[in-house]
Amino acid sequence: MTGAITKELATRILWLAGDLSFKLWEQQRIIYTTIRNMPKTTQNVVVLCARQFGKSVLGTILATEDCLRNKDIVVMIIGPTIKQTRAIVNPRMKLIARDAPEGLIRHVKSEDTFYFSNGSELKLGGFDTNSGSERGKTLHKVYIEEIVESNPDSYLDFLRSDLGPALTHSKHAQIVYLTTLPKIPDHPFCLETVPEAQSNGAFFKFTIHDNKKLSKQQFDSCVKLCGGVDSIDFKREYLCEQVRDSSIVLAPEFNEEIHVKPITIPTHCKLWISGDVGGVRDKSVFHLMGFDFERAKIIVIDERAYSPDTGSAVMVAGCRQMEKDVRIEGRYVDCDGQMRVDFMHQHTYPVHLPRKDELEATVNQVRVALTRCEVEIDPCCKLLIQTLRSGTFNKNKTDLERTSTLGHMDAFMSLAYGIRHCIRTNPFPLYNGADPHTHYIDYNNPERSKSQEAFLSIFKV
């Protein structure tokens, strides 16, 4: 009985001191110590953590300790959506706080907040939270829990518009990322957050091989559930490797090493313009494309991309710049009726509407062309390359995703229309341009005419 009371008292003392490290696994302690020892001036700390590592429990413990150790502060735990954050934190908090002194923590579900007796608050949020919902509060620290499913635009907007201003007046503002990598390689987390943390010495990675709590049977089970050690899911979720998830990206077959090459227009080549006009909502993208007949390659030579609501005059000027010094066989541009009229009558720039098909068939046409290595893209087509690398469907796969960076995947659609209207006819002139009725075609000596040949035969020269 005395031993039980001693243990209960020790637990109470630790809770009141804000030290919950006794609840951690050994492998969690390594990450815990790493984060606690980071300089207070380090604003972003990134910890890539394999699944089943216990990072969600660790994040909840760290956030709870912050609230216990500091009076009248606000700490946040953010997930992809508020619903997901609740599902992650609430059951773990219930488990962690079951031996907490009575009255120390009060949970108000309707407010997604845990209130502490010293006046501090632990709030739950999501990247889908209404913009501005946290303005007016001074945040002490933010823990980002699993960004893997987060929308890139929501992620950026929340960090810049909500968390940024809220952290401005904090003496030791810090955002700690405890997460696996997102499925999209061009996610802002990969392009901006990770490089910044690496440059500041605040980037850490813990893979499944660092997880000492897993038995061999559990390890093998994780591998099996992911589809093997070479599967995309295992590499991303358990080895913390950045890979392109073929389940959501539009063109998993795209390979920059194979499909992106400097393009030189062949001497004889059929050329055309393809495009997708986004109007007031989406981007407008145009490509100069051609067919290299000798190599049987569709080539994407040049690109023009415009922000939403760009005027027709600007777009036509850009397209004409691409067409300078070349002959165009046709223009295939997806646009509304009024824009087509503007192209024709205001700018004398006639375009044809492209043939359309169901979304899946359109996407598959591009994928097949990439699989067969039928397409080569010049490095100057930056938006197209980025879209092929990271463009996705929406969550339900009923449409293409919309993002501020890639638009409504307009560059992808421009490529799709260009492939669909590829002019594959032989561009080389017959008999190298000579008239067979008046000229003898001798490819070893094309200058010799029929009359010359006849003259030589008479005199047996």
Image (cartoon, grey):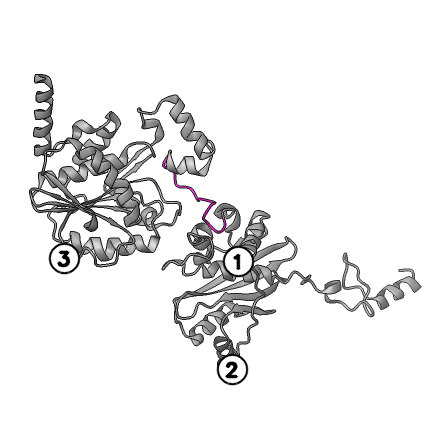
Look at the image and tell me in which quarter the N terminus lies.
top left
User: Residue 47 is drawn in which quadrant?
Assistant: top left
Residue named by callout 2: 345
Q: Give the Cα separation between the discs numbered 2 and 1.
A: 31 Å
Q: Position of residue 361 (x, y in %)?
A: 57, 55
- Of mark 2 and mark 1, the one earlier in the sequence is 2
Q: Tell me if residue 41 comes above or below residue 294 in the rendering.
A: above
Residue named by callout 1: 359
Within 10 Å of the Cα at label 2, are there few (<14), some (14-19), or many (20+) other Cα atoms? few
Within 10 Å of the Cα at label 3, are there few (<14), some (14-19), or many (20+) other Cα atoms? few
Q: Which residue is at 17% across, 57% downward?
A: 135
Q: Give the Cα separation between the discs numbered 3 and 2.
A: 53 Å
**Magenta residues?**
239-251
Name the kind of residue labelled 3 in the image.
Gly
Q: Position of residue 263 (x, y in %)?
A: 53, 56
Residue named by callout 3: 136
